Image (cartoon, rainbow, N blue to C red):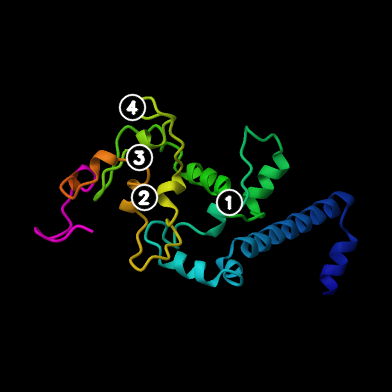
Amino acid sequence: MGWWIERAKGMSRGGWAGFLAVVVLAGAGLFVAGARWVNTSPNRCATCHPVLTGLWKQSQGHPADRVTCYQCHAQHAELPESLNVFGYVRDRLIPEKYAAFEDRVEARCEGCHSDIRTREKENRKLIRINHKVHLADADPQGRPLDLGCLDCHRSIAHDKAEVPTWRPRMYGCFTGDCHRKDRNKDNCRRCHYQQLTEPGAQVL
């Protein structure tokens, strides 16, 4: 201890300035790391939303080891749309202001899947769905469309159905005037290009 005291007494102003800068930066780094851990921990969400957190942990579409709560529900400032650099850095380092309303979640979907509206080729193993067509402003006949990610993938991470899936459900595709001509049990291959049921099985 005496060595440290003697060393401190002999430090120049520049030495003290450097020492204090290191202490401040280390403290700030520890604060940011701790705040980020607290704000992004699913355990914090589970205190109020235990059921939804449990469903998220079982999700196959957004596995818990790859996608967590803050990526879909926290506020994310985006540049160059927002020139608030402080807010941008804060939201990146310490996500906050969680919400589940559609505009927030829709924006986060496209934050990760940025090419989904323009992708020419789909790479799907079981179901063939053209996202570019479904997310367009109008259908091929010129009728306006107003579809978003949640219209088909609302259950992507919190599926409460008895048989969970992150894929669109057939009754959702057939709602209203959508796919009216495809509503027959012999037209499954239009989307399901791999046969998943035994021949002769009843189509529900």
Mark 3 to mark 2 CA distance (whole Å): 11 Å
Residue 54 versus residue 146 in the image, above or below: below
Q: Secondary structure at mark 2?
A: helix
Residue 171: where, in percent of width, then height?
33, 52
Residue topped by disc 4:
140
Q: Closer to the N terminus: mark 4 or mark 3?
A: 4
* Residue occupying the far top of the picture: 142
Mark 1 and mark 3 residues within 8 Å of each other at the beta carbon: no
Q: Closer to the N terminus: mark 2 or mark 4?
A: 4
Using the image, tell me which numbered label, if any, was put on residue 172: 2
Q: Amino acid at mark 4?
A: Pro
Q: Residue at x 69, y 34 (%)?
A: 83
Q: Amino acid at mark 2?
A: Gly
Q: Amino acid at mark 3?
A: Asp
Task: Place residue 98 in its image quadrant.
Answer: bottom right
Q: Which residues are magenta?
A: 190-204
Mark 3 and mark 2 residues within 8 Å of each other at the beta carbon: no
Residue topped by disc 3:
177
Mark 1 and mark 2 residues within 8 Å of each other at the beta carbon: no
Please state the total of marks drawn on the protein image: 4
Residue topped by disc 1:
101
Q: Nearer the viewer, mark 3 or mark 2?
A: 3
Q: Quadrant of the N terminus?
A: bottom right
